[in-house]
Image (spheres, coloured by chain):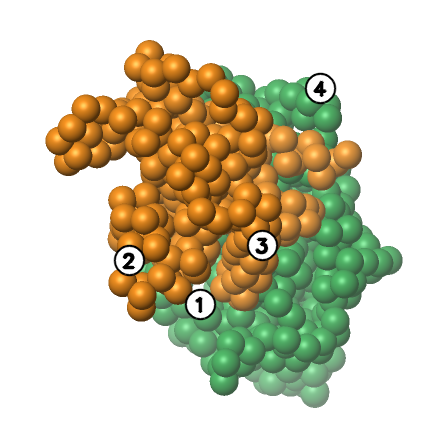
Chain colours: A green, B orange
């Protein structure tokens, strides 16, 4: 069942089109990732869905409520974690969480109980009475996520949740995201970290220049980019013989050699490893490694968008600093 | 009910985080004293407390409200914590009322500090304090909404201060506090009547020392009109400028 449905969503800033007729849906209970470089329109998309930006044209519904006409009702279902930790510096962790609960109309006893639970769940129990400005970046990020879910939203929008924080904190946050999802929260995640999207998301959309250029599950995206099946063998022995032997046994495949011990077998059909290994055995060649070569999400992204990942990361980090 | 929980907590947070901070409380008290002394020294004669009181009250409210609101909202915009309020399921008008109520309360408090001092210096009997309270409330409301208008128009905290002064200082001299409006050059009088403080000051003068010259009902209605207009324009600008 779809919790969020966007149809031809468009955002113009004067003559500049920041988001260009994007259409996508998010299923209840999934982690949906919007992946793209800086300026792709990811944050603008979140802003339109959450009420921070007016929709120029197109429609978006969340939990059945129109994000334009019934915005307040839709907002009640959302939790939002912006790309910067924007809680109140002069308030402590507990007060910040309680305040955020109050914004969603939670009664005092309920929000205080939930805030105390979240501080424990997010590993911040000892920092509950500490002012937000005394938190480390990772702690700030965790508290901001906790603030986003204090009212138990149906969907959580996470805008670049791990950008600019240390590796350990980023790992902790990814674990928290997975835990939240296991408990049933639908997650809409924007990121420029390809490995983060690969690790966390059930479905991913590539966004470039305001457009969604590809959308699908990880498998679908990979399959899309994989024109043929490839199996790689590392072996000891006379590899020249194996080319002919394999061609005899499997006429439709193509073999490529890399150095003295590596051979790749390409086929349009799915390849079965066992018969191939048998051919190696029959030719007295010992196989010590066999693996199916699949394109990485990074390769797929580069192929689809033509954007270099390293450059994308550098740009984002520069902006963040 | 849910919206009012949010309203009350926004107000409580602002009071706690901004208005009830010791520097602001002391500023609220020192400021009226400074104005009183300044006007007294300038007049060079025996202190006419009843003559000064309406002016000092008006200036205390004007400076208290515009400074605080313009700065706090601009500060929250800079730190992006204001976005947290904009994405909460609260009607924008109610949200802006919640953000401005703290400044209005602070302004009313500031407005009555000079009254506290005046009590030690003169007899304040025979004044309709209920109407004075209503007037101070309306001056606080219009000044706060002016502060909101300023906050929505700027990006930086220092700009908020500069822009506030751009409005405040001409208002002080044109609202009839130092020079009666009737005594101003004729070309300046229309500007005087376009300033909400003129009407607030005139009501206070009528109530405290009998020197007002505009009908009370007219002044009250004009102040209410200014309040509604400034709030409407400001919330419209919030939508236009902050909800991109």
Which residue is the site of mark 2?
A: B184
The answer to whether mark 2 and mark 3 are in CB contact below 8 A is no
The answer to whether mark 4 and mark 2 are in CB contact below 8 A is no
Q: How far apart are marks 1 and 3 (CA)?
A: 46 Å
| Chain letter of the residue carrying label 2 | B
State whether discs 2 and 3 lie on one chain: yes
State whether discs 1 and 3 lie on one chain: no
Q: Is residue B212 visible in this depiction of the protein?
A: yes
| Chain letter of the residue carrying label 4 | A
Q: How far apart are marks 3 and 4 (CA)?
A: 41 Å
Residue visible at 23% across and 24% down?
B47
Viewer-side residue, B140 vs B183 = B183
Which residue is the site of mark 4?
A: A109
Q: Distance between the residues labelled 4 and 2?
A: 59 Å
**Which quarter of the figure is the N terminus of chain B placed in?**
top right
State whether discs 1 and 4 lie on one chain: yes
In the rendered image, which quarter is residue B32 located in? top left
Q: State the SS at label 3.
A: helix
Which residue is the site of mark 1?
A: A38
Residue B76 percent across, percent down from the top left: 43, 44
Q: Sequence-wise, which precedes: disc 2 or disc 3?
A: 2
Q: Distance between the residues labelled 2 and 3?
A: 24 Å
State whether discs 3 and 4 lie on one chain: no
In the picture, the disc for residue B225 is 3
Residue B244 percent across, percent down from the top left: 53, 66
State whether discs 1 and 2 lie on one chain: no
Residue visible at 60% across and 30% down?
B9
Q: Which dot, 1 or 3, sits closer to the camera?
A: 3
């Amino acid at each position: 069942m779809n919790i969020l449905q966007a149809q031809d969503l468009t955002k113009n800033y004067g003559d500049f089109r920041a988001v260009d007729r994007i259409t996508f849906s998010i299923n209840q209970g999934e982690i949906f990732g919007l992946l793209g470089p800086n300026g792709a329109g990811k944050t603008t998309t979140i802003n339109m869905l959450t009420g921070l930006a007016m929709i120029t044209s197109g429609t978006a519904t969340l939990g059945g409520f129109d994000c334009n006409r019934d915005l307040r009702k839709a907002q009640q279902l959302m939790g939002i974690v912006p790309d910067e930790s924007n809680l109140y510096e002069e308030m402590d962790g507990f007060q910040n969480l309680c305040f955020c609960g109050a914004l969603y109309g939670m009664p005092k006893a309920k929000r205080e109980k939930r805030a105390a639970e979240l501080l424990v769940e997010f590993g911040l129990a000892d920092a509950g009475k500490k002012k937000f400005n005394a938190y480390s970046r990772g702690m700030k990020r965790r508290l901001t996520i906790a603030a986003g879910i204090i009212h138990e939203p149906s969907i959580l929008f996470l805008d670049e949740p791990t950008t600019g924080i240390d590796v350990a904190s980023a790992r902790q946050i990814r674990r928290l995201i997975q835990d939240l999802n296991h408990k049933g929260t639908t997650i809409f995640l924007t990121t420029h970290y390809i490995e983060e999207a690969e690790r966390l998301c059930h479905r991913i959309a590539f966004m470039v220049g305001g457009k969604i250029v590809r959308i699908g599950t990880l498998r679908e995206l990979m399959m899309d980019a994989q024109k043929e099946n490839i199996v790689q063998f590392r072996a000891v022995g006379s590899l020249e013989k194996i080319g002919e032997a394999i061609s005899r046994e499997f006429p439709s495949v193509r073999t490529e050699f890399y150095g003295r011990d590596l051979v790749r077998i390409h086929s349009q059909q799915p390849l079965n490893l066992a018969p191939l290994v048998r051919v190696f055995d029959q030719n007295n060649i010992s196989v010590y490694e066999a693996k199916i070569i699949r394109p990485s999400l990074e390769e797929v992204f580069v192929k689809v968008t033509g954007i270099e990942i390293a450059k994308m990361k550098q740009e984002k980090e520069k902006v963040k600093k | 009910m849910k919206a009012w929980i949010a309203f009350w907590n926004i107000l409580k947070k602002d009071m706690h985080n901004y208005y009830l901070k010791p520097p602001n409380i002391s500023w609220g008290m020192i400021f009226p004293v400074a104005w009183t002394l300044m006007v007294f020294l300038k007049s060079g004669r025996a202190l006419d407390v009843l003559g000064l009181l309406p002016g000092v009250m008006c200036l205390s409210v004007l400076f208290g409200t515009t400074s605080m609101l313009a700065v706090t909202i601009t500060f929250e915009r800079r730190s992006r914590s204001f976005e947290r309020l904009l994405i909460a399921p609260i009607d924008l008008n109610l949200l802006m009322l919640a953000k401005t109520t703290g400044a209005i309360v602070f302004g009313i408090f500031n407005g009555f500090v000079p009254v506290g001092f005046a009590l030690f210096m003169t007899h304040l009997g025979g004044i309709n304090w209920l109407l004075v309270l209503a007037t101070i409330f309306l001056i606080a409301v219009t000044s706060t909404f002016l502060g909101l208008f300023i906050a929505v128009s700027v990006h930086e905290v220092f700009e908020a201060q500069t822009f506030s002064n751009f409005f405040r200082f001409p208002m002080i001299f044109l609202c009839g506090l130092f020079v009666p409006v009737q005594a101003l050059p004729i070309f300046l009088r229309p500007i005087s009547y376009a300033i909400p403080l003129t009407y607030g000051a005139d009501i206070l003068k009528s109530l405290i020392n009998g020197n007002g010259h505009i009908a009370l009902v007219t002044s009250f209605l004009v102040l209410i009109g200014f309040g509604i207009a400034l709030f409407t324009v400001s919330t419209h600008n919030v939508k236009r400028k902050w909800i991109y």
